[in-house]
C-alpha cells in the first residue's frame, strides 16, 4: 500500500531551461549564452554546485574568476534561478494526495539557489514534508548516496513509496533501491499510474 510519494522537481513539478540560465547569467558580464554554457556545464562547475561540492559563495567567486568580471551575487543568483515554470496541472494532485494523509518527499538534483527560488516563488513545494536535495546529500541521482538519503526520508518501506521522475535512468536506480517507480511523462499519465495502484485522483 502506497504511503509516501517521492517526486522529482525539474520537468515534473516545474519545467526549466538551462539555455535561459546561461543567457541571463551572460547578460550580467557581457558574455554570450554559449560562452557561459562552456564555463558552467562543460567544465562541470554547475554539477559541482548541484552536488554541494561548492557553496553558493564559492560558486560566485569561481564564476567571477571565470568571466574576469565582478558580478553582484544576488543578481547572479536570480539570473541562475529565474528559469522555472510550475506545472500547474500537478498542484491539485499533490494537494489531494496530501489531504488523504500521504507523505510527500522531494528528490531533486538541484542547487541551493534553484531550490530556494522555486520554494519562495511558487506554491508547488508547500505540500511537501521533506526535501532530499543533491546539494545537501553530496551526491546526485542516480548515485546510491542520494537514494539512501531518500530512503531515510520516506518513513516507510521502499515498496510502499511511489517515485516518479522524468529520467529513465533515475527510475531504474530507484527500482534497484526497492522503490515502486515510474517515468513521469505528464500529469494525465501520472494519474493513470496512480489509478493502477488503487489511488483515484
Image: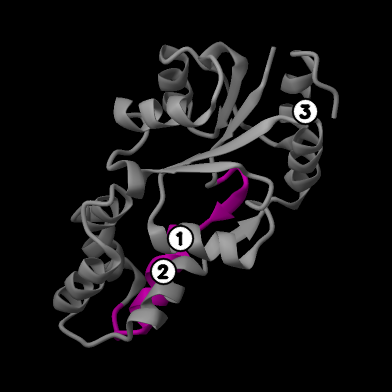
Q: Which residue is mark 3?
A: 191
Badge 2: residue crowd in 10 Å (few <14, some 14–19, many ≥20) = many
| Quarter of image, res 56 | bottom left
Residues 50 and 85: in front is 50
Which circle marks residue 80 in the picture?
2
Contact (Cβ within 8 Å) of mark 2 with mark 1: yes
Tell which tag, 1 or 3, sits nearer the viewer.
1
- Residue 98, position as x, y percentages in the image: 75, 37
Tell which tag, 2 or 1, sits nearer the viewer.
1
Quick one: SS at disc 1?
helix
Mark 1 to mark 3: distance in Å?
Answer: 27 Å
**Bounds of the magenta segment:** 11-31
- Residue 99, position as x, y percentages in the image: 81, 37
Which circle marks residue 114 in the picture?
1
Quick one: SS at disc 3?
helix
Indicate which disc, 2 or 1, sits on the residue closer to the N terminus: 2
| Quarter of image, res 33 | bottom left
User: Up-down: is 12 above or below 46?
Assistant: above
Task: Report the side of 158 relative to 135 (left or right).
Answer: right
Amino acid at each position: 500500500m502506497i504511503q509516501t510519494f517521492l517526486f522529482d522537481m525539474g520537468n515534473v513539478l516545474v519545467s526549466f531551461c538551462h539555455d535561459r540560465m546561461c543567457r541571463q547569467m551572460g547578460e550580467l558580464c557581457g558574455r554570450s549564452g554559449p560562452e557561459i554554457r562552456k564555463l558552467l556545464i562543460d567544465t562541470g562547475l554547475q554539477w559541482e554546485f548541484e552536488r554541494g561540492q561548492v557553496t553558493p559563495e564559492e560558486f560566485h567567486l569561481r564564476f567571477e574568476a571565470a568571466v574576469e568580471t565582478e558580478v553582484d551575487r544576488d543578481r547572479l543568483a536570480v539570473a541562475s534561478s529565474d528559469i522555472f515554470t510550475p506545472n500547474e496541472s500537478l498542484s491539485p494532485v499533490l494537494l489531494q494526495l496530501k489531504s488523504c494523509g500521504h507523505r510527500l518527499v522531494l528528490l531533486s538534483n538541484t542547487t541551493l539557489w534553484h531550490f530556494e527560488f522555486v520554494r519562495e516563488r511558487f506554491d508547488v513545494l508547500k505540500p511537501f514534508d521533506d526535501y532530499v536535495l543533491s546539494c545537501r546529500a553530496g551526491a546526485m541521482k542516480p548515485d546510491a548516496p542520494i537514494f539512501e538519503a531518500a530512503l531515510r526520508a520516506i518513513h516507510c518501506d521502499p515498496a510502499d513509496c511511489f517515485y516518479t521522475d522524468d529520467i529513465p535512468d533515475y527510475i531504474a536506480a530507484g527500482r534497484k533501491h526497492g522503490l515502486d517507480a515510474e517515468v513521469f511523462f505528464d500529469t494525465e499519465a501520472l494519474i493513470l499510474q496512480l489509478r493502477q495502484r488503487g489511488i483515484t485522483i
